[in-house]
Image (cartoon, rainbow, N blue to C red):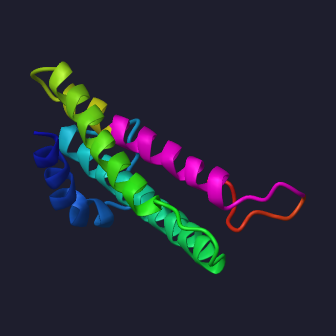
C-alpha cells in the first residue's frame, strides 16, 4: 500500500517541480501539500543518493575493505517502506495519513543521509568532511 502512495508522490513530482516556492507548512489544499511534500522527498532522495555515491567512492579508494553498503541501503529502503507504510495505515481514513506517511519518509531519509555522512564521509582528525553535514 505504501508503494502505491510513493508511486502517487512520484506522479505528482513533475507538478511539484513547477510549483515554485510551495510551502508545506501552509498549503492551500491537500493536492498542493502533497506536491510540496513530493518535491521535498525528491530533493531528499537526490541528496541521499549523492552522499551514498561519495561514500562508495571513498570506500572504493581503499582496496583493502569490502563493505555491504548496497545491501544495507536496500535493507534501509525496505525498512522505510514498511515503517512509513505502517504510519499510512495507522492513520486510517482521511488525508492526514498522506501527510504523516510523507513526513515519515522525509524524516527517515534525512536521518539516513546523516548516518551515511557520519559513518563514511567524516574523518577522526580535523580533516574537513568529504561533503558538508546534511
The spot of residue 27 in percent (x, y) is: 31, 39
When the figure is inspected, residue 105 is found, relative to residue 51, above or below; the finding is: above
Query: Which residue sits at x=41%, y=36%?
Result: 25
Eyeballing the image, is 120 above or below 57? above
> Residue extending furthest front?
64
Residue 21 in sight in this render:
no
Q: Which of 1 and 70 is in front in this view?
A: 70
What is the magenta segment's predominant secondary structure?
A: helix
Q: Position of residue 72 (x, y in %)?
A: 42, 53
**116 falls in the magenta region:** yes
User: As drawn, is 73 to the left or to the right of 117?
Assistant: left
The magenta stretch is: 103-125
Instruction: From this view, report whether residue 12 is shown above or below residue 54.
Output: above
Residue 7: quarter of image:
bottom left
Residue drawn 90% across the image and 59% down it: 126
Q: Which of 70 and 52 is in front in this view?
A: 70
Where residue 104 sits in the image (x, y, percent)?
A: 35, 35
State the residue at coordinates (75%, 63%): 129
- Residue 88 lies left or right of residue 54; in this view the side is left
- Whether residue 38 is visible: yes
- Left or right of 30 in this view: 43: right
- Taking the spot 43% from the left edge, 47% from the top edge, the residue there is 109
Among the 4 quarters of the image, the one containing residue 97: top left
Q: Percent x, y for residue 56?
A: 54, 71
User: Residue 17 lies in what quarter of the image?
Assistant: bottom left
Nearer to me, 80 or 42? 80
Say which quadrant the N terminus sits in.
top left
Q: Does the magenta stretch include residue 122?
A: yes
Amino acid at each position: 500500500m505504501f508503494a502505491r502512495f510513493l508511486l502517487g508522490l512520484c506522479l505528482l513530482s513533475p507538478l511539484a517541480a513547477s510549483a515554485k516556492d510551495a510551502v508545506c507548512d501552509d498549503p492551500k489544499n491537500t493536492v498542493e501539500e502533497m506536491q510540496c511534500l513530493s518535491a521535498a522527498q525528491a530533493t531528499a532522495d537526490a541528496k541521499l543518493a549523492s552522499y551514498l555515491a561519495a561514500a562508495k567512492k571513498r570506500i572504493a579508494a581503499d582496496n583493502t575493505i569490502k563493505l555491504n553498503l548496497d545491501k544495507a541501503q536496500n535493507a534501509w529502503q525496505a525498512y522505510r517502506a514498511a515503517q512509513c507504510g505502517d504510519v499510512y495505515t495507522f492513520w486510517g481514513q482521511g488525508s492526514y495519513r498522506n501527510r504523516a506517511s510523507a513526513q515519515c519518509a522525509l524524516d527517515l531519509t534525512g536521518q539516513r543521509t546523516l548516518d551515511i555522512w557520519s559513518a563514511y564521509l567524516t574523518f577522526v582528525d580535523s580533516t574537513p568532511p568529504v561533503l558538508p553535514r546534511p
